[in-house]
Amino acid sequence: MEGNVLIGLNAVGRYFESLEDPRSEINLRHPLVSVVVIALMAVLAGADGPTAIAKWARCKEDLLLKHLNLPNGIPRMDVFRRVLSTLNPAAFQACFACWLQSLQTQVAQATGIEQPILSVDGKTLRRSHDRRKGLGALHSVSVWASDFGLTLAQVACEQKSNEITAIPEVLKLVTLKGAIITIDAMGTQTEIAQQIVDGEGDYLLALKGNQGTLHQGVIDYIDEQFENHFANVTARQLTTKEKGHGREETRTYVQMPAPKTLPGHNRWKNLKSIGIVLLSCLRNGKETTETRYYISSLNVGVKQFARAVRGHWGIENTCHWCLDVTYREDESRIRDANARDNFAWLRRFTLSLLKQHPAKDSIAMKRRGCGWDDDFLIEVLTGQRT
């Protein structure tokens, strides 16, 4: 095992060699790369803060001293706290860019998916606020590749701002070419649509009241086509049915070309189609219904439209749910501005690593496995069998 571990951890450490050390040079006893690699390993194994990272590191002292550059032994909790509180989140995340690109390439080749769904959505860490310091809860926007199980980027919203300003920034961090970018109604903005098209991607944007005249125009047009039984338009329809978790769900997807008469049509670059999703859910004998509307730069192709819609819902079901249930992110009380942002990224990145491992165990069980078994931890971290 030792040779594989050494090769694997050296490869991991190289991703962080360009990271600028924010600490004072006075009494600098622990190499930055080793501190960061330990933090990454510990979060993968279940740690949720600097204290837990330090305790995990002490438990794994033999492993870490053997394979990392630690001339002064295992760092104390204050070292992890100071590093993660002073590291610039953007610079920290940038270190993972090559790693993520490698993972994305591997999964794309394995799955054969040529047009991935990249879902953009926001999430709030509800207990990360500090009223005494006037620090609001961290709200960040991330990009989730649902086909690959990878978080590709994350940007924190500025205080007293919202997702509209963060979405263009997070889109700058990912490759848009050839992808379908899906965004909730908050991000349905003409500038964002243009940014996606200029990046050679396609967009699928949800509509709600924030796009009042366009939203109503799409509703009126689709209602008219339903009444005429689509006699005057080339529409495509797909219905899916699913059973599970005590409920039955029926989804009807309808897509059609976007008419030039839509309010503000010429303001939306490459607007080609509009769509509606009708959701009916039967649970405990009670039926609920929901209707959602979309605009898109995609040509009419209802299977692709349905795939993109379902892909966007995946960020809630396969990413945010895991962060809240497995990582207990909503309970995190880290209230330093940089530290909470850096920990949020570590959670998302380690979740991506766990999803890449081929074992069929749940994410929670894989994470426990990383805490119990050094071999398994290294397998997940490096993608190499030990």
Image: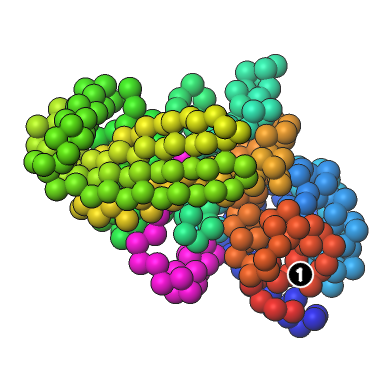
Q: What sort of colour scheme is used for the picture? A: rainbow
Element carrying mark 1: helix
Residue 107 falls inside the magenta stretch? yes
Q: Please state the horizontal and vertical placement of residue 123, each as a whole percent of the image.
A: 55, 35
Residue drawn at (76%, 58%) of the image: 365
Residue drawn at (59%, 57%) of the image: 352
Give the number of marks. Answer: 1
Residue 146 is left or right of residue 55, and the answer is: left
- Image quarter of residue 301: bottom left
Q: Please state the horizontal and vertical placement of residue 257, each as a whole percent of the image.
A: 16, 45
Which is nearer the eye, 58 or 24?
58
State whether residue 8 is above or below residue 338: below
Question: Disc 1 residue type?
Answer: Phe
Which is nearer the eye, 124 or 316?
316
Residue 342 is left or right of residue 62, and the answer is: left
Q: Which residue is mark 1?
A: 376
Residue drawn at (88%, 50%) of the image: 55
Q: Would residue 35 be visible to someone looking at this image?
A: no
- Image quarter of residue 84: top right
Instruction: Specify start and end residues of the magenta stretch as a single range.
Output: 98-121
Q: State the quadrant of the N terminus.
A: bottom right
Residue drawn at (24%, 28%) of the image: 219
Which is nearer the eye, 42 or 319?
319
Q: State the quadrant of the C terminus.
A: bottom right
Label 1 CA crowd tier, 10 Å (few <14, some 14–19, many 20+): many
